[in-house]
Amino acid sequence: MSRAHNFSAGPATLPEPVLRQAQQEMLDWHGAGASIVELSHRGPEFMQVAAEAETDLRALLAIPDDYAVLFLAGGATTLQALIPLNFAAPGQAADYVVSGHWGKTAVKEARPYADVRIAASSEADGFRGIPARASWQLSEDAAYVHITANETIHGVEFRELPDVGAVPLVADFSSSIASEPLDIARFGLVYGGAQKNLGPAGISFAIVRRDLLERAGQPRAEILDYRAHAAKGSMLNTPPTWSWYLLGLTVRWMLEQGGVAEFARRNARKAALLYAAIDGSGGYYRNEVDPAARSRMNVPFFLHDAALDQPFLAAAKGAGLIGLKGHRALGGMRASLYNAMPEAGVQALADFMADFRQRHG
Ligand SMILES: *Cc1c(COP(=O)(O)O)cnc(C)c1O
């Protein structure tokens, strides 16, 4: 058996030591006589797993005490609908800065519950950059300002946090959480799905400033209520225990590797290597994103002739490089370089790209 280098955007590659540990613990978790997936979420074993995952995530991201950490079933899209329900009064304005596909999704999910205003959008430019802060039309009465820290499909990333004054900044960090140090105190809410950089699908995270939990929001069922989830330790109902457990192992691995400062260095080197391979190809490969907004995590690129896409993907697979097909909205290729992607994987991709270009010049 040999594992390929997996560049999938999500669900995505996980650290091999995490998978091995899960494999080893699969039948009998720490002498419990059963797998962790088979045990009650309210029993001492899973309570320990859940608590350690939160403690470790708090340590990894340096989350201040005045922020609650929620682990919720469902994906980032679910949270995009829950955010206005919990934090905007009925009909209240909410500002959205749209820099790609997921910003548009956030708008769509919020529209039934808030007076969604597009404060800025780079759609007219094909989402090739971040709208300049000076161009944003923010509303003074907005419940929050929403941004997508990293656009997973368009490969556009905020490289500088915007100042939005006193209005809470809400950010979708699905595909870049824990990729570099982050000042959580700058945000009202940081959220995302786990399946990009933090673990498997099926669980999402919300890091929310506690005072926001006091907002009335809108009439909603208790199961959609952040405050209720926070009060019950994200165990209002049965949580996705398997996903939570794997997230915990992944976060522990990141701490053992040296934490976000170390991953920031690795991720910068990986991204530099791949963008150099693209930019140095004389137009054989191209990435169209404004260099100042290029994502370190997701690198979409195109071959100079789309007829080469299938041969490229087939040859890449033969070389042990998978998950490179671009999102259907853009076509072309996309390489995702999450924390679990080793530098050797990116080097192998860069070498393969040079070799492919020589053979199909
Ligand atoms: C993947 C992704 C989403 C959607 O996540 P789901 O878990 O599929 O709902 C939202 N935002 C960003 C930035 C993403 O990368």
Image (spheres, rainbow, N blue to C red):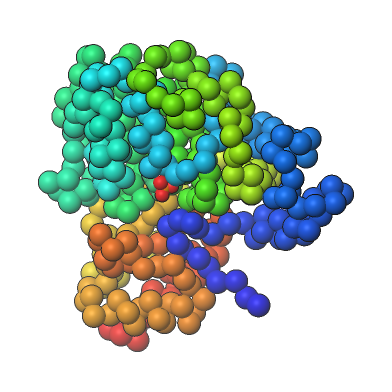
Estimate the x, y position of residue 186 in percent, counting from the top left: 42, 23
Estimate the x, y position of residue 298 in percent, counting from the top left: 39, 54
Query: The N terminus appears in which quarter of the rendering?
Result: bottom right
Residue 70 falls in image quadrant: top right
In this view of the protein, which residue sits in the foreground, 213 or 167?
A: 213
Query: The C terminus appears in which quarter of the rendering?
Result: bottom left
Is 309 located above or below residue 118 in the figure? below
Estimate the x, y position of residue 79 in percent, counting from the top left: 41, 36
What residue sits 84% from the left and 47% below the top?
Answer: 32
What residue sits 25% from the left and 26% below the top?
Answer: 114
Is 84 located above or below residue 19 in the figure? above
What residue sits 23% from the left and 20% below the top?
Answer: 91
Relative to 104, 221 lies left or right: right
* Residue furthest out toward the left: 124
The reply to whether residue 291 is in sight is no
Estimate the x, y position of residue 155 in percent, counting from the top left: 32, 52
Number of labelled discs?
Answer: 0
Is 353 located above or below residue 98 in the figure? below
The reply to whether residue 228 is in sight is yes
What residue sits 50% from the left and 21% below the top?
Answer: 227
* Residue furthest out toward the front: 221
In this view of the protein, which residue sits in the foreground, 210 or 286?
A: 210
Relative to 76, 72 lies left or right: right
